[in-house]
Amino acid sequence: MDRAYNSFVVLDDGTVVTKDLSRGPEPSTFSVLDASTLEDRAVPVSLGEPSVARLSADGLVVYAQGTETALRFVWDPDRGVLTAETGAERARAATGSPVPSVVFPAVDHAGALWYCSFTTLARVTPRGSPSAEGLRDPTGST
């Protein structure tokens, strides 16, 4: 790969997942590595779109922010496969950021995605998810 890598996370089983930096049009790629040998543990996985943001992880789940989509991938160490958990699911969230900017995603213990741009910090929680219980929509919409 002839691109720089700008992020990595260590999963609960010790596996390192890293991502190359792509401003487009080529999609970014995950590399899944053994922490001791830095050998591939799986074939490289395309994110399906460019990404300049950092990675976040919780357990065996990796979160990435593409240019259009918040992405969630699950690592299966027994099968040696990193797969998109909900790749067909796409949504846009109004976060109040006045300008488009680089996104730094992070996940909290309740499974919500925190979106941090140059001007905005927002908690994005899918409706109906366990992490959405007890939350109120400040706009009053359902």
Image (cartoon, rainbow, N blue to C red):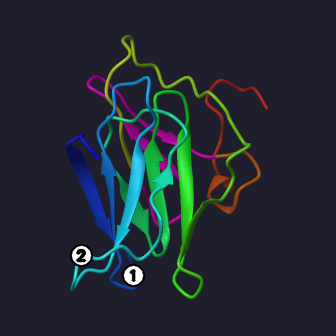
> On screen, 53 above or below 38?
above
Q: Is residue 122 magenta?
A: yes
Per the image, the residue denoted by label 2 is 38
- Please indicate, yes or no, whether residue 111 appears anywhere in the rendered image: no
Who is closer to the viewer here, 57 or 47?
47
Circle number at residue 75:
none
Circle 2 packing at 10 Å, graded few (<14), some (14-19), many (20+), is: few
Q: Earlier in the sequence, mark 2 or mark 1?
A: 1
Find the magenta span and give its range.
Answer: 107-125
Could you tell me how many numbered marks the image carries? Answer: 2
Quadrant where the C terminus lies? Answer: top right
Q: Amino acid at mark 1?
A: Asp
Is residue 90 placed above or below 43 in the rendered structure? Answer: above
- The residue positioned 51% from the left and 83% from the top of the image is 77
Q: Residue furthest front?
A: 1
Amino acid at the residue labelled 2: Leu
Residue 7 forms part of the magenta stretch: no
Q: Which residue is mark 1?
A: 12
Residue 8 percent location from the top left of the image: 27, 59
Q: Residue at x 60, y 46 (%)?
A: 125
Q: Secondary structure at mark 1?
A: loop
Query: Callout 2: helix, strand or loop?
Result: loop
